[in-house]
Amino acid sequence: MLTARFTAPAVPKTLVHRPELLRRLTAGVRGPLTLINGPAGSGKTVLTAHWAAAGGRAPRAPLWLTVEPDDAPGVFWAYVLEALHRGGVELPAAVGRPTRAEGVTQSFLVRLAAGLAESAQPVVLVLDQFDTAQPPAMTEGLDFVLRHAAGGLRIVLTSRTDSLLPLHRYRAAGEIAEIRHADLRFTHADAEALLGEHRLDISQAGIRLLMRRTEGWAAGVRLCALAMQRSPDPEAFVRQFAADRTTIADYLLREVLDAQPADTQDLLLRVSVTDRVHPDLADALTGRDDAARTLAGLARDNAFLEQVDASAWYRLHPLFAEVLRAHLRQRHPGLEQQLHGRAARWLAGTGRLTEAVVQGAAAGDWPFAAGQLVDDLAIGRLFTGLEAEQLNRAFAPLPAEAPGAAPALVGAAARLVVQDLPGYEDAARRADARLSPGSGAAARFSRAFLGVLAGRATGDPAATERAAADAARVLGELPPPRVAAHPELRALLLAALGAVRLGAGRPDAAESALTAAVEACAGPGTDPGTQYPLCDALGSLALAELMRGRLRQAAEHARASLAVAEQAALPPERRSGAGHLVLAGVAVEHDDLPAARSHLDLATAIAAAGPRPDAVAAVLAAVIGARIAAYEGDGEAALAVLTRRRPAATAAATPAPVSAWAVDELAVAESAAHLARGDAAAALRVLDAAPCGRPEHLLARARALLAAGRTGPAARELAGLPADEGLAAPARLAACLLRARLAAAEGDTEEARRRQAEAADLARPEGLRLRLPPFAESGPRVRRAPGEAARPPARRSRPADGPPPVMAPPVMAPPVVESLSARETEVLRQAARMLSTEEIAAELYVSANTVKTHLKSIYRKLGVTRRSDAVHRAQDLGLL
């Protein structure tokens, strides 16, 4: 008898404590059978040994027996009896002992079961590596003894495969506890604890990457930790390690691959070229017809292959697949590319476009891969949808010299995705050279489609309109079902067209295209491909409404845009800052400068991480930033904002000229900044350098003239304004306030009072601010923002006979982007009690990091940056 087989393995020094699994083990041995099932290296034996070392929390310490592959039934039962004897279990002498290795008699099993039934205390026996027990007679005998021992025997099995025991019968009777692979996987906290045991300080992002690579496989995490200890840069190791060049490869090859028959090894090597495999696809890759049986057996045996959501598809563990691919290249040079090509055509034949394209690209068959994307009208999937990142990664190695129009079109699209306009132009020229009037409608549509998106990137309205007309014409030649299968095409086209029209200063024309884009995203069902263009179109619609002074509609579209981005979990590079930018503009009009600055900061942060902003967004970001500074009375800061942001604003429009709207909007903002500095002459010079007939320009001139003391010319500018019906609400209010100032300057106190009362009526419905940007003229601002310190006027104070200030309507809080969750509301309620982060965590039984995460979400939703502001805002909104 080998003594080592009766001893549980030593618990590793770098042990990860897993109290929940230990608790489940303890609860499990109250019944007859506990099964711990998982692949090699999943931690089955370590967990069970840790539990056994603690005595198993049972009256009698658990007994241990390691099962060996060559155990015959008689040998197995002899070892079981010896384990019981060494554990102090007294059995009647009549039980006897096995007399031959080949097996035992039924009477022996009866006597053993009867002897265990008479035991004073239940016996808990761990059978480690029970999957190595091959003869059915062994499992049949164990099942007989377990069922007839009357609770005197309780078995804990660790196994890579499902035992030959009739598990269904134990499940039906509720007499089995199971801990499976999904339970054994390391959590993020487990991995963090293990790395800490190895004295490794790895960032949270690094741990997440490690978990993604290993999928929680315990041995993989441990082997990586050991390798990281030897690495000069452990953090870089996580990002760069290749599984095929580490001890992980040795482990998987010896423990998993080499344990399989030759035919199964060949199948595993061949199917490793795909992310997931169907039995029919596996047969196509191997040229055999046994894949269904082989794959099912491998999944059942936990051979690092698992069934995908109870479907007919299977997937390999990513580390195992990486090792297998390296082994395939070593064993069969050149075969991998052939297998990719074979898989691409099988997948295309079954309608799995994205997988077919990825496999074709991996095979280097660029005409096939790009042709699939173009012919199916799926080129828009490079710009939006769940597969966008995967498809762009697949086409990253696409060579410029790849033959055919389709590779040139896809290459142009890939350049446009990353906003490489010179690279796009080169690829577009190659595509134009390879296209002809006889080219298919799908290819001609793809070219026009890219022209629209490129027109938006360059800010060229004429080119965009021409390309949009071409796209609409060719779209009519294509089969309607194929067009309907790709709603993202129409959504992307219309969103781009609307944005370009908006940049040209045509908000009315933009609105029609953008509204149609939103409608194109609202078809039956929710297509992931339409989430990005929907967010984009809603953001542009919000900008259009803000430009026209429709604040309520602007805020509604902005909130809707932000909600879509949140619900779709769009990555930072796919988000638009337009939603927050519009809310910043609305907050300025509502005279809530802290909220305006908060939203503007968020918009700026998103713009820095995401795509280059359109001309309108860039201009408005500069204008809103300058207006905030001007309303705070800091003209120098306002000018600095315009100087800093104007190049970014105009760069988005190159090489096309900046629109007249953008030029005038910047000029009006700069004039206001000069007025805040007390320099009316400079304000007039800026406006006169860019003459324009927009009402906003006339209002800015009237303001500057009044500040310069030129009441007559100021009155004439105001007289040139359109009728009230032709003015947006903010412009009407500004005109009314200017007329009140003009009347006061001319000594007409009654007219000034009347105009101020009229202004209060105009401001009330939309909650507009009841003041003009500060400028050096008679009279202070009509009122100050809440909490704002009084500032001395720049030149002289209001005459004694000037009109008294009018009470303004209450300032409206900026709209909440998204409702607070129940947990966020509870966190905010505790914050209102002046508790610290740690105290809130203790009160709610969560970690301090969780509280911080909730607080960040609360700040974003309420448009604030501090805890006290969040509490006050929530109280104002009735949330607390």
Image (cartoon, grey):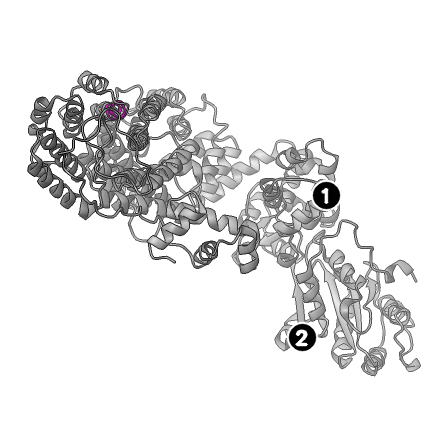
Q: Quadrant of residue 335?
A: top right
Nearer to the camera, 681 or 217: 681
Q: Which mark is residue 175?
A: 2
Instruction: First in sequence, mark 2 or 1: give its number.
Output: 2
Residue at mark 2 to residue at mark 1: CA–CA distance: 36 Å
Q: Which residue is mark 1?
A: 223
> Which span of residues is magenta-colored?
670-676
Q: Could you tell me the amino acid type at mark 1?
A: Leu
- Viewed as shown, does residue 625 lie left or right of 770? right
Q: Quadrant of residue 208?
A: top right
Q: Secondary structure at mark 1?
A: helix
Q: Is residue 126 above or below residue 842?
A: below
**Residue 597, x across and y down, in percent:** 36, 37
Q: Is residue 80 above or below residue 484?
A: below
- Viewed as shown, does residue 639 lie left or right of 170? left
**Residue 65, x across and y down, in percent:** 83, 64
